[in-house]
């Protein structure tokens, strides 16, 4: 099942920003920039602010304008967006086959720890 047209798909840069914003929950552009600059010292505040404004326009972020500094939050929970992106990828790249998607992921190489965790999950032993 393809992603619903009402759910926008983020670009790679937008996903990077969401990876920073999800743990924060809600934050100002300054707070997001401060968190992003730790991993990417070259990213400017202006770039982060502009990207957040674009993401708000696309519906990827919601914005609280009640304070002087606008507070942004993801419009979708991390798990929900990842599930939608995964469904879209599975449909487009693997003809809707979850098995083919999983096999392709496993063939790319996984750590022993990840393999053991997957085996436990498949056996129903939980985490």
Image: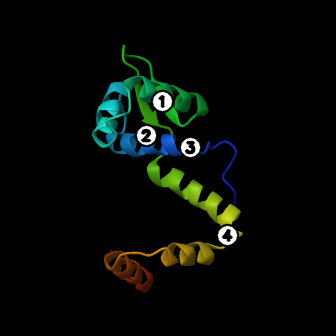
Residue to which mark 2 is pinned:
17
Q: Which colour assignment does the render follow?
A: rainbow
14 on left or right of 7: left
Q: What element carries label 2?
A: helix
Q: How far apart are marks 1 and 3 (CA)?
A: 12 Å
First in residue order: circle 4 vs circle 2: 2
Q: What element carries label 4?
A: helix
Quarter of the image holding residue 90?
bottom right
First in residue order: circle 2 vs circle 1: 2
Relative height, residue 39 to residue 113 (above, below): above
Q: Are marks 2 and 1 in contact (CB under 8 Å)?
A: yes
First in residue order: circle 3 vs circle 4: 3
Relative height, residue 65 to residue 89 (above, below): above
Query: Whole-percent x and y of residue 43?
Result: 38, 33
Q: What element carries label 3?
A: loop
Residue to which mark 4 is pinned:
94
Relative height, residue 75 to residue 110 (above, below): above
Quarter of the image holding residue 84?
bottom right
Query: Whole-percent x and y of residue 27?
Result: 35, 31
Q: How far apart are marks 3 and 2 (CA)?
A: 10 Å
Residue to which mark 3 is pinned:
11
Residue to which mark 1 is pinned:
52
Relative height, residue 97 to residue 13 (above, below): below
Q: How far apart are marks 1 and 4 (CA)?
A: 32 Å
91 on left or right of 68: right
Q: How far apart are marks 4 and 2 (CA)?
A: 27 Å
Q: Is mark 1 on a helix, strand or loop?
A: helix
Q: Do the residues labelled 3 and 4 touch (CB within 8 Å)?
A: no
Front position in the image: 23 or 111: 111
Residue at 67% over, 42% down: 6
Q: Are marks 3 and 2 in contact (CB under 8 Å)?
A: no
First in residue order: circle 1 vs circle 4: 1
């Amino acid at each position: 099942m393809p992603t619903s047209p009402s759910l926008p798909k983020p670009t790679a840069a937008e996903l990077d920003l969401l990876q920073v914003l999800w743990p924060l929950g809600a934050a100002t552009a300054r707070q997001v920039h401060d968190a992003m600059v730790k991993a990417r010292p070259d990213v400017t505040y202006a770039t982060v602010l502009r990207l957040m404004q674009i993401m708000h326009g696309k519906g990827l972020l919601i914005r609280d304008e009640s304070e002087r500094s606008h507070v942004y939050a993801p419009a979708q929970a991390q798990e929900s967006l990842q599930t939608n992106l995964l469904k879209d990828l599975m449909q487009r790249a693997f003809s809707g086959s979850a098995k083919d998607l999983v096999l392709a992921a496993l063939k790319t190489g996984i750590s022993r720890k990840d393999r053991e965790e997957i085996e436990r999950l498949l056996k129903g032993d939980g985490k």
